[in-house]
Image (cartoon, rainbow, N blue to C red):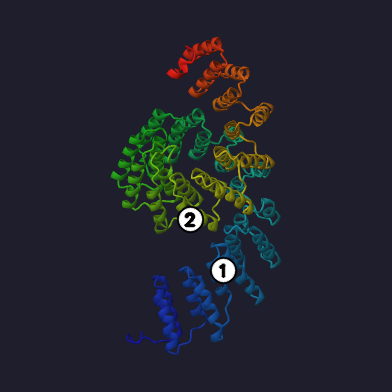
Amino acid sequence: MLKMKISSDVFTYSNVIEAYFRASDVDGAKGAFLEMDEKGCSPNGVTYNMMISGLCRAVLVGEAVEMKKSMAEKGLVPDKYTYVTLINGYCGKRKLVVAKACRIKDEMVKYGIRLGLINYNTIPNGVCKADLMSKARDIVDEMIKMGSIPDSRTYTSLIEGYSGNEMVSFGLKTNSVIYNTLISAQAKAGKFEEARGLLDKMKEQGILPNVFCYNSSIMGLCRENKLEAARICWDEMLARGLKPNAFTFGAFVRAYTNVGDMEMADKYFNEMLAYGLVSNDEVYVDLIDGQYKKGNLTEANLVLMRMLAGGILPVVQTYWVLINGLSRNGKVLEALSILSELCEKGLNPDVYICNSLITRFYKQGDVDMAMLLLDEMHIKGVNPNIMTYNVLINGLCKADGYCKFGNVADAFQLFHEMPSKGVPADSYVYNALLDGCCKEGKLKEAQELFRDMLLKGFASTMSFNSLIDGLCKRNRLEEANLLLEEMSEKHILPDNVTYRTLIIYYCNAQNMQEAKQLFLKMQVMNLTPTIVTLTSLLNGYNIIGDRSKILYLYEEMLANGIELDKVTYCVLIDAHCKEGDIKEALRLKDEMLKKGIPMSFGTCHALIQTLYEAEEFLQALNFLNEIGEAGLSLSLSACSMIT
């Protein structure tokens, strides 16, 4: 300004500041304001208001507030414009920021500055957007006390909190637009009776509902799968001579697709086309997705062809549905072909598309392809999310199930990569790694992970079960038992799997006293033992020759209606054979075969040997015939016993 010999008065500086803000040059405006002070030109209230207004428009409300505070140092008092500007700047933001707007409004009232209706309306609008409805109610009450009568805009802003009755009490006329907004708000909140009541009130007031009013109710009901009620609205709308639009039909198509009724979804879709309405890509995508979920690949493809014929080009969401649908139906190669097409068209796959394929590769046991796809994601700049890592780490850690690799080292590499990608590991990732370490016998790493999980609050019954199983497999039963005690200390409840694991390994170690104690604890906790747990106990008592305990457990199983399986029958037959109780052994054999449960080779051999030793040669021959009919063959030594 000095170089151009422009007079440096307040008026000139204020205009320069305003010009800078209009050019979106906030730094220039700040510079001009500081220069005023340096040149001894004191800014006035107008200058400050220009700065505050410009800073609010630039979403620098915090700086604008500081500017307002500095006015006092210059002996200036904020006016109505100052406060209203700050209120407007704060409204529509986060709850915390809207609360600040309310504090500024309170300061205005304190200094006797009266707000007009327009100013008041700004606050309820922002407060409602921030979902602070009780505060909105207080502000409306304050408006009335201050002599500002709420108008249509006030009640439209407070749509979710107020009814049309209050508008009428102030002599304001409602119309279909306001009612539509009210109905839409009630429907979105799931208050369908209230929405229905508003439609009835429209009729009472002589206001004819339009298609948008009915759409609000229909769309809300369809979202909640209340299809019968939605059809009643539909019928009423048609009876009033109103024609449904694409949004009406789209709501029904999506709702029927969601519940898997593709026949009805197709009906509404075809009816929409018969009305001459043009469908958007969302309706087509819903139909394609629905057909894939039902396994109707041909029908899904026909919908796609119809969409393309209608001149609607697929977008990323369309490709996601196609890739996900094909993958889910085992057509992974076709899904990869669709992915290639997406990339050729210059569209980048999103993380959901990639996750869909990675999940399918994981389920097919092809972890190598899943890892290659992860590399491709990195190349294309697609950031993996927690689901990506969950699936891959799970797949790499599993030594059974879908994946046969059990590559815990690679899983840990992904685990250490996660922080650099901004993805924090969750309990699923930790549990997968813990289980993988235990299965591979890497107990040191497993215990380190477990302690980390305890610190992070991720440890659960599943975590304890994995480590208990890993310790038991290495015959570290005392340590495993200590973990059971630790569960109690940390208020983590053991389940059937916890006790079953410990009981099985104590039985294998022939420590039946400890197995019995665990069995009793299990019953105290109201946990019903499974057939596997009971069979382990039977086998343990059979090994140490405790017949009384075997009979007691067997009677308990019968009393509780527990169906015996192959292993249980074989243990019981073996126990009776050892006791020389041929009658009971044969009875159990007959019962087993009658149920269609095949006998094991070891059980057949034990029974033949028992019959031979008891010189029951005829029964042995009969049993041998049964074995032959069952397609089993015995060893030469077993056959030589009865020849």
Residue 176 shows in the view? no
Q: How far across and how far down the image is residue 619, in percent?
A: 56, 11
* Residue located beneath label 2 in the image: 448
Q: Nearer the viewer, residue 264 or 394?
A: 394
**Badge 1 vs badge 2, beta-carbon distance below 8 Å:** no
Earlier sequence position, callout 1 versus callout 2: 1
Q: How far across and how far down the image is residue 95, in percent?
A: 58, 62
Q: Nearer the viewer, residue 299 or 65?
A: 299
**Residue lying at 35% horizontally and 34% vertically, measured from the top left:** 309
* Residue located beneath label 1 in the image: 87
Residue 538 shows in the view? yes
| Amino acid type at image mark 2 | Glu
- Asked whether, in this view, residue 281 is left or right of residue 464, the answer is left
Above or below, 5 against 313 in this view is below
Helix, strand or loop for disc 1: helix
Helix, strand or loop for disc 2: helix
**Residue lying at 49% horizontally and 31% vertically, measured from the top left:** 265
Q: How far across and how far down the image is residue 73, in percent?
A: 55, 85
Q: Quadrant of residue 210?
A: top right
